[in-house]
Image (spheres, rainbow, N blue to C red):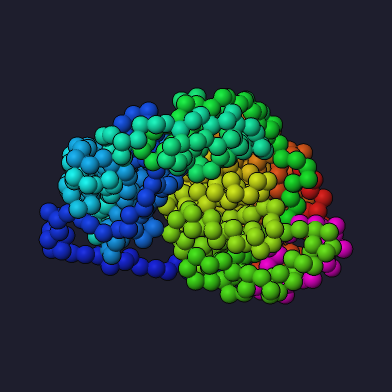
Amino acid sequence: MRIRTRTRTGSPGPHRTRTRLACGLGATLLGAAAVLTAPGSAFGANLLANGDFETGGTAGWSCSGGLGSVVASPVHGGGKALAGAVSGANTAKCAQTVAVQPNTSYTLSAWVRGSYVYLGVTGGASTWTPSAGAYTKLSVTFTTGAAQTSAEVYLNGWYGQGTYYADDVSLDGPGGSADTVAPTAPGTPTSTGKTSSSVSLAWTASTDNVGVTGYDVYQGASKVATSATPGATVTGLNPNTAYTFTVRARDLAGNTSPASGPVTVTTDNGTVPAGFKQAAPYLYNGWGDPPNPTTVMNATGAKWFTMAFILSSGGCNPSWDGQRPLTGGVDQSTINAIRAAGGDIVPSIGGWQGNKLGPNCATPEALAGAYQKVIDAYGLKAVDVDIENTDEFENAVVQDRILGALKIVKQNNPGLRTILTFGTSTSGPTSWGNRLIEQAKAQNAGIDVFTIMPFDFGNASTDMYASTISATEGLKTKLKSTFGWDDATAYSHIGISGMNGLSDTGETTSIQNWTGIRDWANSHHIARLAFWSVNRDRGCAGGGLQENCSGIAQSDWQFTSITAGFTG
């Protein structure tokens, strides 16, 4: 979000003293509501679902306060691990309930890292480590009672002791009850849709004597998706590549079916269809003498606008600018007018400041639910998350939460286009930008467009054309190295969002600069071109940084007209 005071607020939460900590070291830690969950794969003895967290989420686990998330570093094995964001008032307890057999011995183990990490069985045995600077294995054995058919296992940290990490959590022993009948093999899957980075599959349901509890999709020996229903979307794939998938079913006792027949699907070629290219300058109803969108469209030929900003109206509830209603207000009237004139919009979620959804929604699932409210309100074709500042962009937990949420909404809304917008250096993504891209790959988030904001570099004499091209080429190089794409594919996943006229730091993007940037974007077939903002697309030479004009000499809507000539 631009032309706003960049304040940074907040303070650390309450911290428990060492005295309180010492009082609880030997206690068995109980609490946290149990969640009945199907056991995981029966290829080994592990009864836990998602014990390695390779699904990219906390499915199967219930984490108190929504403080559990999945991260790509540090990990013990594979590419994912659990992170418990302990606070001064919450131990970030993550628990899972599984079916067990009475009078039977089980071994619970986990690899953990952090200060004061606990592993145990609710109402039974537990163990802990006071300090593990590297991954350390915890293990505890227990025997179930004479009539016991379920057990809750848990991990947690301790008050104010910082984030703990856990990976490769295992419960070894026989599955619940005496059921040894495996489900029947699912029907051979069929492809129900695909993009350059995802494949949607459906199959005929399995049958089981006590009921199927879920399905696992495999690419070779690797589990790449899970589902409670006979259908799933696999994301994070490479363009124009053939993939072969099979499916297995699970039941409550941990029995796994034989594999289905294989299906081979080739992803799309990775370029964004011409109909989805976006020339979409920002339009903001919050200030800056918002123009009539129909007037601008008629004068320039513009069709798309990026509508800013979706924030939190309190908790995990989306609203325009954190205060205007999601529907029924001026923003909906603006969108209705744009669509009536033959155009469309993409909402920008986030921005530089304000009360944002990323930090307020506790889990990727909750954040995806907030995004879904916006998608459903307007039947959207695309969503843009403008991820900035220390509360979202420079925050690993929130970065991962946003990526997880976008992955979920993409799975739940076939054809939806997802966009990430973030700052950059003149040579390409910063370290936080690099991390965001790497995590998008690690989480298989399936992001369609990575849009950089090449301005506010801090030097009023910056050559904005040269710096924009240099930053975009740096982004292309990073996308190629991360995803294994060629030049054309990388360009087709890139967006540029500039700032017309004067920037916050006194740089000047001239009419000539922006025309050159538009022409370069067309010749390299990128996916998106935007600028901040249509409100400012009016001349006021020598007027300085303004909300309703560019600060330079120009005709009304001249930057919008240039942008409308972007075809990709």
Residue 45 in view, yes or no: yes
Compare residues 238 and 234 and report the one nearer the observer.
234
Quarter of the view holding residue 486: top right
At x 77%, y 67%, the residue is 336
Position of residue 347 relative to residue 491, above or below, is below
Percent x, y of residue 448? 63, 44
Furthest-right residue in this view:
298
Compare residues 454 and 433 and report the one nearer the observer.
433
Quarter of the figure that contains the N terminus: bottom right
Q: What is the magenta range? A: 282-307
Residue 1 in view, yes or no: no
Is residue 284 one of those drawn in magenta? yes
Position of residue 236 relative to residue 65, above or below, is above
Q: Is residue 326 left or right of residue 517?
A: left
Percent x, y of residue 314? 49, 71
Percent x, y of residue 132? 22, 43
At x 54%, y 58%, the residue is 369
